[in-house]
Image (spheres, rainbow, N blue to C red):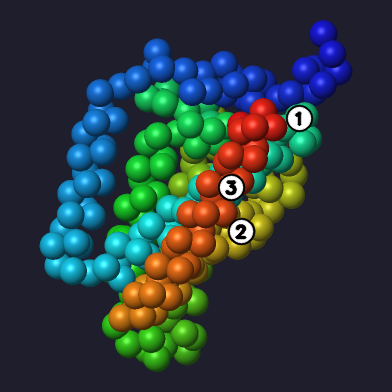
């Protein structure tokens, strides 16, 4: 057995074993898809395209991080920044399940609907966008800490792990919530919103194709 194989963590090996395996499918995934469709249908009915595009921006930013996580795994030959184990209907990437992806595609929608209409409103003397981006990010990292403690979500590197969570807060989530708020605050500037969301989608597709062809997914 090669040294590269020996270096791979147990959690990463477990994830590789079920990566894109169809025999783990659960019908609950269809119900989750219905929920996602309903959330977006409501916003489209209300013609809240700012909310829709902000939600998609959040989701696409997560895809960028997930693709980078897969690349880190294959470049290191040891472990990604985060790994998923335990029961899942479908493991899309080494750190992304279909359930997590469906959660994130609605998370951005839920977040921007909590933003005060007035960007000038301050919370504890600070800009409300900054405070809420930070607060929601901290909550998400707290959930990850609990999942990590439960043994179904794994961190390997000391600098991306408990107790060194600031990097996870900033790069793991504040980028998601930040870009969702940014797109949402573009308001009626639909062209600019579409450019940002389209640009994110293009980057993800190019990265996915490139990594896929290289065998790094």
Q: Mark 1 = which residue?
A: 78
Residue at the spot 66% in from the left edge and 58% down from the top edge: 167
Q: Which mark is residue 206?
A: 3
Q: Does the CB distance between marks 1 and 3 fall below 8 Å?
A: no
- 57 is higher (above) or lower (below) than 160: below
User: Which of the pair 127/95 is nearer the observer?
Assistant: 95
Left or right relative to 199: residue 162: right
Q: In 3D space, how far apart are the residues under numbered discs 1 and 2 (Cα atoms)?
A: 21 Å
Above or below residue 48? Residue 149 is above
Depth check, front residue: 197 or 39 = 197
Q: Which residue is mark 2?
A: 171
Rounded to the nearest whole Å, what is the CA distance between mark 3 and mark 2? 21 Å
Quarter of the figure with the N terminus: top right
Residue 46 appears in view: yes
The label shown at residue 43 is none
Which mark lies nearer to you, 1 or 3?
Answer: 3
Residue extending farthest right: 3
């Amino acid at each position: 057995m090669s040294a590269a194989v020996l270096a791979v963590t147990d959690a990463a090996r477990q994830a590789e074993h079920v990566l894109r395996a169809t025999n783990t499918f659960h019908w609950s995934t269809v119900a989750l898809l219905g929920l996602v469709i309903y959330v977006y249908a409501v916003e489209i009915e209300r013609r809240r395209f700012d909310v829709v595009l902000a939600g998609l921006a959040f989701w696409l930013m997560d895809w960028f991080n997930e693709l980078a996580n897969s690349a880190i795994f294959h470049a290191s030959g040891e472990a990604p920044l985060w790994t998923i184990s335990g029961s899942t209907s479908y493991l899309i990437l080494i750190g992304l399940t279909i359930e997590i992806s469906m959660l994130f595609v609605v998370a951005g929608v839920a977040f921007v609907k909590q933003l005060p209409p007035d960007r000038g409103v301050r919370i504890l003397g600070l800009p409300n966008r900054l405070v809420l981006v930070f607060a929601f990010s901290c909550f998400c990292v707290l959930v990850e800490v609990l999942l990590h403690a439960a043994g179904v979500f794994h961190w390997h590197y000391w600098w991306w792990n408990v107790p060194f969570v600031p990097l996870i807060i900033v790069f793991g989530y504040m980028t998601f919530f930040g870009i969702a708020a940014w797109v949402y605050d573009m308001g009626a500037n639909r062209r600019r919103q579409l450019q940002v969301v389209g640009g994110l989608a293009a980057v993800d597709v190019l990265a996915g194709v490139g990594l896929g062809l290289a065998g790094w997914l």
